[in-house]
Image (tube, helix red, strand yellow):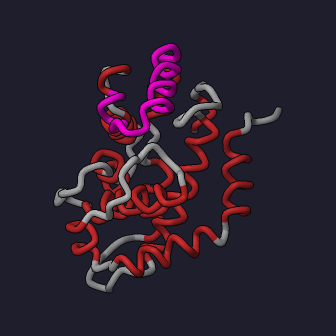
Amino acid sequence: MSRTFTIPADGPVGLQSFWRHSIYCASLVSELVKLLPESVAVKPGLAYLSGLLHDFGYLVLGHLFPARFFLFNHFLAVNRQVSSSAIESYVLGAEHWHIGAWLMQAWSMPEEVIAAVRWHHNEDCTQPYAEYSNLVLIANRLLHYVGLGEENNNRLPVLAMFMLGITREQAMDALARVQSSMADLDTLSEALRLPSEG
């Protein structure tokens, strides 16, 4: 799917960083799903897909507005203390989650994935299928500890953690398990960002 979109490889949300972050997020979401109590009904495959596709709006924005996307990457790189959503609104005039959710709807993706794409930056999400967006939110915050993604906040969201029944210690253990697979995950993300042959 992503090879339909042409965006620069470099930058905080360039194609290389995009796929690396997406693969790590999906893997971390999968680890977090294993921690959920039985009372939290989450489908592991849809949770993984939510982690993989949650930032897909960046590909659309980069493809449609290459000059602005270049500026957005530059602004992100030099303004790490400013929230990415504020920079997105200022430079691009839209936010990736809004564009991504619209695209997921247009592609008739499952409602769980659409919810994750739409709400993954919302700390107090109680919308239908909030479990999926909360998993992605937690994974994004955890990935800040290893320097991945545009999220500049590593404070784990209290409500999301409580709703899912995950403790901080469990979340940090899940991150450690993903870190132990970094070489394999980097190989996979590299393969995804390369153009198809033939």
- 28 to the left or right of 38: right
- Please state, as top left, top right, bottom left or bottom right, where the C terminus lies in the image: top right
Question: Which residue occupies 29% across, 65% down?
Answer: 131
Image coords of residue 186 (percent x, y): 69, 55
- Location of residue 32 (image quadrant): bottom left
Q: How many marks?
A: 0
| In front of the other: 48 or 81 | 81
Q: Is residue 94 above or below residue 43?
A: above
Could you say which is closer to the camera, residue 72 or residue 82?
Answer: 82
As for residue 75 lying within the magenta part, the answer is yes
Q: Residue 184: x, y in percent?
A: 72, 63
Q: Along the line of sight, which residue is nearer the eye, 4 or 142?
A: 142
Q: Is residue 59 left or right of residue 35?
A: right
Residue 175 colored in magenta in the image? no
Relative side of 16 to 94, left or right: right
Q: Residue furthest top?
A: 67
The residue lying at 51 percent from left, 70 percent from top is 175
| Magenta stretch, overall SS | helix
Q: Position of residue 88 (x, y in %)?
A: 35, 28
Residues shaded magenta: 65-88
User: What is the quadrant of the N terminus in the image?
Assistant: top right
Picture residue at 67% right of the left edge, 59% below the top: 185
- At 28% from the left edge and 79% from the top edge, which residue is drawn? 165
Q: Is residue 46 visible?
A: no
On the image, the x and y values in percent for residue 177 come to 58, 75
